[in-house]
Image (spheres, rainbow, N blue to C red):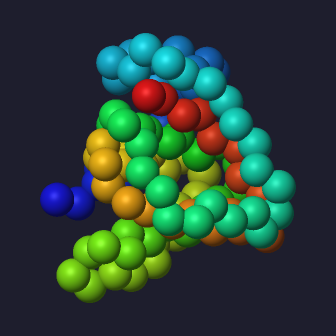
């Protein structure tokens, strides 16, 4: 199954926007330039709404793993238990996370 990947219109209150999608635990996170998260999973569905910068994600367990890059306004959902790896872009990345 492919994660949800779409460009959203950012509201004046992006945390409230993500809560409106049904996520109860919502917070804003910033990663510095070129940060890296090795392959990992989360217990529940996780969404990411990118406010600044960008990130690249890959799913190493997929039959045909490939990297996909997302930038400002993109919403990216990762299913519970789906192993993924993330590279933050050279400008860093600020995003709202919903769990």
In which quadrant is the N terminus drawn?
bottom left
Picture coordinates of residue 18, whole percent (x, y): 46, 25
Which residue is more in the foreground, 76 or 10?
Answer: 76
Q: Is residue 79 among what the camera can see?
A: yes
Picture coordinates of residue 72, whole percent (x, y): 60, 51
What residue appears at the point 34 percent right and 34 percent down from the top-left corner?
44
In which quadrant of the rendered view does residue 82 lie? bottom left
Picture coordinates of residue 68, whole percent (x, y): 45, 72
Residue 36 in the figure: left or right of residue 58: right
Q: How many marks?
A: 0
Name above or below for residue 17 compared with residue 6: above
What residue appears at the point 48 percent right and 50 percent down from the top-left corner?
74
What residue appears at the point 54 percent right and 22 percent down from the top-left corner?
26
In which quadrant is the C terminus drawn?
top left
Picture coordinates of residue 37, whole percent (x, y): 62, 61
Name above or below for residue 57 compared with residue 62: above
Q: Is residue 17 among what the camera can see?
A: no
Extreme residue toward the left, this view: 1
Residue 56 in the figure: left or right of residue 2: right
């Amino acid at each position: 199954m492919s994660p949800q990947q779409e460009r959203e219109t950012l509201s004046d209150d992006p945390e409230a926007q993500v809560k409106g999608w049904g996520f109860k635990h919502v917070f804003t996170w910033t990663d510095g330039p070129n940060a890296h998260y090795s392959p990992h999973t989360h217990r529940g569905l996780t969404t990411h709404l990118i406010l600044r910068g960008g990130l690249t994600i890959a799913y190493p367990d997929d039959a045909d793993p490939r990297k996909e890059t997302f930038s400002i306004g993109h919403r990216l959902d990762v299913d519970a238990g789906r192993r993924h790896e993330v590279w933050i872009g050279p400008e860093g990345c600020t995003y709202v996370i919903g769990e």
